[in-house]
Image (tube, rainbow, N blue to C red):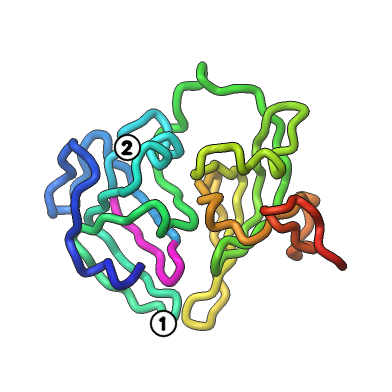
Amino acid sequence: MMDRIPRRLRVAFSRPLAAESGSPTAGEVAFVAYGVDCILSGRTVLEADRLSDMLNAHDEYDLVGVTVERLDDGMPLQVDEVVVARDELYLVHASGPRGDAARRRHTLPKHVAMKVGPYEVQGFLHGLPGADPVVSIRRRKPMIPLTGARIAYVVNGEPREDELDTVILNRERIEWIAVVDSDRAALPVRRPLETGQPEGT
């Protein structure tokens, strides 16, 4: 991701973003993207009822007023504007609405742990009643919400942990996933996403 940061790329959205003064406009949300080697914090336009809908509808996302925090040394870098491709995203969270409550379906949560690139993640994955959300994850759109999330990672050799009400994860970046007890602090024996079968002890 870092080799693309200094360049201004093609804008993905039709609606203009706020001026470089830093003042947000209607429809803008704070947007944090976790990548393979850095975390981007900026603003973008929410062009759907929900963040997950927007992420699944576009291949690129235009961010303005961006701060880049590199995982290797923690040094910040300021960028006026950057476009990030969806396949570069591992996890995303943003401010803004949760969408129309009338459109929500009844789901059952499963507490899961997973490895997503350099990030260790725990939270609640939601699926339809009677369905295993871990097994069915491959049949869903690539950007999937996780609630009650905890993200552990390392910046400049120091451990860090973010706790978020909701995070959107890129299922294509999940290395392994497992259902765990919600009060379990340690990461479990891993369950590869490709097979859905547990590895050995």
Image mark for residue 46: 2
Q: Is residue 128 above or below residue 145?
A: above
x and y percentages locating residue 191 in the rendered image: 75, 57
Q: Residue at x 74, y 26 (%)?
A: 129
Image mark for residue 29: none
Q: How many marks?
A: 2
Q: Residue furthest front?
A: 195
Q: Is residue 31 above or below residue 2?
A: above
Whether residue 113 is visible, yes or no, is: no
Q: Residue furthest top?
A: 102
Element on which disc 1 rests: loop
Q: Is residue 42 magenta?
A: yes
Residue type for callout 1: Asp
Q: Residue at x 37, y 36 (%)?
A: 57
Q: Is residue 72 left or right of residue 174?
A: left
First in residue order: circle 2 vs circle 1: 2
Q: Which residues are magenta?
A: 35-43
For the N terminus, the image quarter is bottom left
| Quarter of the figure with residue 75 | bottom left
Element on which disc 2 rests: loop
Say few, some or many: other residues with alpha carbon within 10 Å of mark 1 (under 14 / 14 to 19 / 20 or more): few
x and y percentages locating residue 189 in the rendered image: 79, 63
Q: Is residue 26 left or right of residue 146?
A: left
Instruction: State the predominant SS element of the stretch in magenta.
Output: strand
Q: Is residue 80 magenta?
A: no
Whether residue 76 is visible, yes or no, is: yes
x and y percentages locating residue 158 in the rendered image: 54, 79
x and y percentages locating residue 165 in the rendered image: 55, 45
For the C terminus, the image quarter is bottom right
Image mark for residue 73: 1
